[in-house]
Amino acid sequence: MEIEEIKAKVASSEYDFLRTNEHLGNRVILLGLGGSHAYGTSNAKSDLDVRGCALNTKAEILTNTNFEQFVNEGTDTVIYSFNKLISLLLNVNPNTVEMLGLKPEHYLYISPIGQELLDNKKLFLSKKAVHSFGGYANQQLYRLQQKSASHMKQAELEKHILKTLEHMRTDFSSRYSSVPGDSLKLYIDKAVQEGYDTEIFMDVKLSHYPLRDYCSMWNELQNTVKAYAKIGVRNEKALTHNKIGKHSMHLIRLYMMCLDILEREEIVTYREKEHDLLMDIRDGKYLGEDGKPNAEFFEMVNDYEKRLDYARANTSLPDEPDYERINEFVMSVNERVVKKV
């Protein structure tokens, strides 16, 4: 689908909600492509995904009302509220940071404030990208590894889950009360549960810690462990619908985007230079006759893992984003909303 065709479609009555919904309309500051069209990996069967950002209202800002995002499933459209988007960008969330790195022609609308957001995109880049992109990639990799063999060994799976949990734990520091490094320790040891060879254990040493923060962290850890039990079912559906190639492609794309952030301090959503490789992966070149990822693909993944390890150790990015300047920007935007400037 050509960009002019996409723009005409978004201007049609099918997308009238963009103009009539109480949270959208003239509050929208950024509107652009998402998914395969944004990555440059679309084909004739690709759906159109639209992503964007809308300012919070005066009432939402002053009363801290919790509007986070608008979703229209029929058109695969997601519009984040400004305050919610900022919170996600602070953690270099892959699903949202890609909105700041589109090709110019892939932006369907940019307001003056939307342009300010794009101009300030580098403020959000930090070493947190390792854990945010790494967490997404790690779960995606497990799904593919599980499909490449009849069953992953239990001890291997525990290591994989631990890696994901460690990515999450690093992210906790920005969202919950501070937890000193030795206060919450996750590690693998000989199992006590029947049927397990090894399992993940935790040591917790906390005092005078907010109960709600602890409960929230515990729920996130618990939900992630439970999610791994469901991944096999999702993979069977992916295999049935011939989506393993697409999932494999997105794993490599995540590595590519993260390396751009760590090595060049740039957000590059449209993968022009790697287009042919990504399309080869999507089209099944790296799948065996059984429809599962082959050894050559996992060698490629291993190479990207090594590059990521090196980039992690040598990046010049700060540990944390520039909170002070980001807060100044957010206050400036929200103040203009409240004062209707």
Image: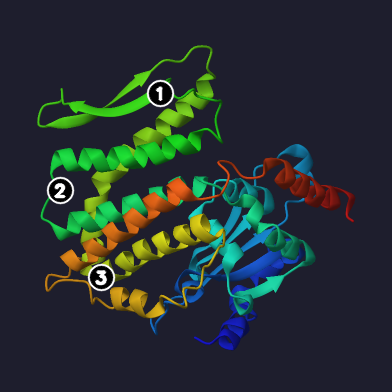
**Disc assigned to residue 107:** none
Instruction: Name the kind of residue labelled 3 in the image.
Output: His
User: Going by the image, does 216 lie left or right of 328?
Assistant: left
Instruction: Name the kind of residue labelled 2 in the image.
Output: Met
Mark 2 element type: loop
Point out residue 122 in the picture as x, y percentages from the top left corner: 64, 56
User: Going by the image, does 105 lie left or right of 199?
Assistant: right
Q: Nearer the viewer, mark 1 or mark 3?
A: 1
- Disc tally is 3
Mark 3 element type: loop
Point out residue 104 in the picture as x, y percentages from the top left corner: 63, 76
Residue pointed to by mark 3: 241
Specify the quadrant of the image occupied by residue 164.
top left
Residue pointed to by mark 2: 152
Residue farthest to the top, as pictured:
207
Instruction: Name the kind of residue labelled 1 in the image.
Output: Leu
What distance separates the C-alpha of mark 1 from that of mark 3? 41 Å
Residue at 13% x, 44% y: name it.
153
What distance separates the C-alpha of mark 1 from that of mark 2? 28 Å
Q: Earlier in the sequence, mark 2 or mark 3?
A: 2
Residue 78 seen in this snapshot: yes
**Disc assigned to residue 184:** 1
Point out residue 199 in the picture as x, y percentages from the top left corner: 20, 30
Q: Earlier in the sequence, mark 1 or mark 2?
A: 2
What distance separates the C-alpha of mark 2 from that of mark 3? 22 Å
Q: Earlier in the sequence, mark 1 or mark 3?
A: 1
Between 174 and 230, the residue placed more toward the observer is 174
User: Going by the image, does 118 lie left or right of 277?
Assistant: right
Specify the quadrant of the image occupied by residue 283.
bottom left
Residue 60 seen in this snapshot: no
Residue at 65% x, 75% y: name it.
108
In what quadrant of the picture does the C terminus appear? bottom right
